[in-house]
Amino acid sequence: MADGGPPTPGAADPIVIDTMTGGLTGVTAGYLLPAPRPALVECGPALTIDATIAALRGLGMDPDDLAWLVVTHVHLDHAGGAGDLLAAFPRATVVVSPRGARHLVDPDRLNDSARRVYGPLFDTVYGPCTPIAADRVLAADDGHVLDLGAGRRLEILDTPGHAKHHIAAFDPDLGAVFTGDSVGVRLEGMRALRPATPPADFNLGTMLDSLARYRERDPAHLYLAHYGEVGAPDAVLAEADDGVRRWVAAVEEARRTVPAHEDELDHVADLLRHRFAEDLDLAPDAAEDAEARIALLNDPRSNAAGILRYLDRRDAGTLTPLG
Ligand SMILES: [Zn+2]
C-alpha cells in the first residue's frame, strides 16, 4: 500500500516494550506488533537485552513465537542486543538496511567503533553485539513488505539522514510510522523535539527527504524510539524539519566564531547547549533522572560533532548522496 489511507479497524495497536537502556526507564522503546507472525521494532542494547526478552515472555511469547525483529539502524541503543534476542527467539529473522546488514553478521567493526565513540559507556550501558548467522538477516530494500500474517503487513522505508543505513517501518493498517531516530528524540522532561544528528554520517539533505517521505504517508501515528508515541504527527514532522534546519544553522554560525584558543567542538557544543536549553522543561523533582536520560541519548556534543562533520564534507564537496 503506497498511501497511509484510513486505518483499518481492529488492527491491534503496538505494545511498548521498555528496553531499560542504561538501566533507566523511558530511554529506548521497542514496539511489539501483535499478529500471527509478530514483529518487534528495536530491541535495545546487548547489556540490558534480558529486560526486553523478559517483557516479551511476560506478554506470553514463547521462543518460537517471534517472527521479525526490525532494527531501524545498527547503533547499539537500537540493535546492540539483536544477536542475543535472536538466540532467545530462534525462529526470528532480523530486518535491517542493506547498508547495515554486514555489521550484524560480523559486528567486530561496529563494536570497535562503538567502543571509541562511547568510551566507558560501551561497557556500562551498551555491551558488545554478538554475531548473527547470515541466513537470519534480511537486508530489506525500500518498499520491502514483511508478512505478519492474517493480512497484516509492515512496509520498510529507506530513510537515511540520521545514519546512511537508517530505515523506518510503516504499518498501513494503523497508519503508523516507527521512526527510529529519523524524526528526533523527545523524552519525558523535554518540551521540544530534538534532532539526532550524530557522527559519522548525519546528512541534512537526506534527513529532510526522509521527513518528506513520512509526510507523503499522512501518518495517523508516529512512534519514536526515544520515546513513545508522539501526538499530532503533522505538527511533529514540521517541528522536526524546522528543528534540524535550526540546529545546522546554529552550528554554521557558531563555527565562524571559534576563539583562537578554543577547541571548535567544545565551542560549538557549548553554544548549542546554551541556545537550545529551553527545549528542556524539567520538573524539579524529576530533574536528575530526566537529565541523565537526555545526556545519555542526546548530548549536544554528539549533535555538534555530527553537524560539524556534515558541514566539513559539504564544504569539501565530499558528501555522497547517501551520506
Ligand atoms: Zn542512532
Image (cartoon, rainbow, N blue to C red):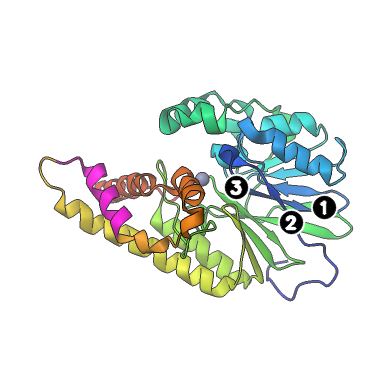
Q: Name the residue under label 1.
A: 148
Amino acid carrying mark 2 in the image? Leu
Q: Can residue 59 be seen in this view?
A: yes
Residues in magenta, as a range: 262-274
Residue 118 relative to residue 221: left or right = left
Residue 119 place in picture, x, y as percent? 42, 29
Measuring 42% from the left and 44% from the top, which residue is drawn there?
201
Query: Residue 154 got which mark?
Result: 2
Q: Nearer the viewer, residue 73 or 189?
A: 189
Q: Mark 3 points at which residue?
A: 28
Q: How crowded is mark 2: few (under 14 residues within 10 Å), some or many (20 or more)?
A: many
Amino acid carrying mark 3 in the image? Thr
To which quarter of the image does residue 106 belong? Answer: top right
In the rendered image, the vertical position of residue 149 relative to residue 113, given as above or below: below
**Which is more N-terminal, label 1 or label 2?**
1
The answer for how far apart the CA atoms under marks 2 and 1 are is: 7 Å
Measuring 76% from the left and 28% from the top, which residue is drawn there?
87
Which quarter of the rendering shows the N terminus?
bottom right
Measuring 44% from the left and 49% from the top, which residue is drawn there?
298
Residue behind label 3 places its C-beta within 8 angstroms of ligand 1: no
Q: How crowded is mark 1: few (under 14 residues within 10 Å), some or many (20 or more)?
A: some
**Which is more N-terminal, label 3 or label 2?**
3
Q: What element carries label 3?
A: loop
The answer for how far apart the CA atoms under marks 2 and 3 are is: 21 Å
Picture mark count: 3
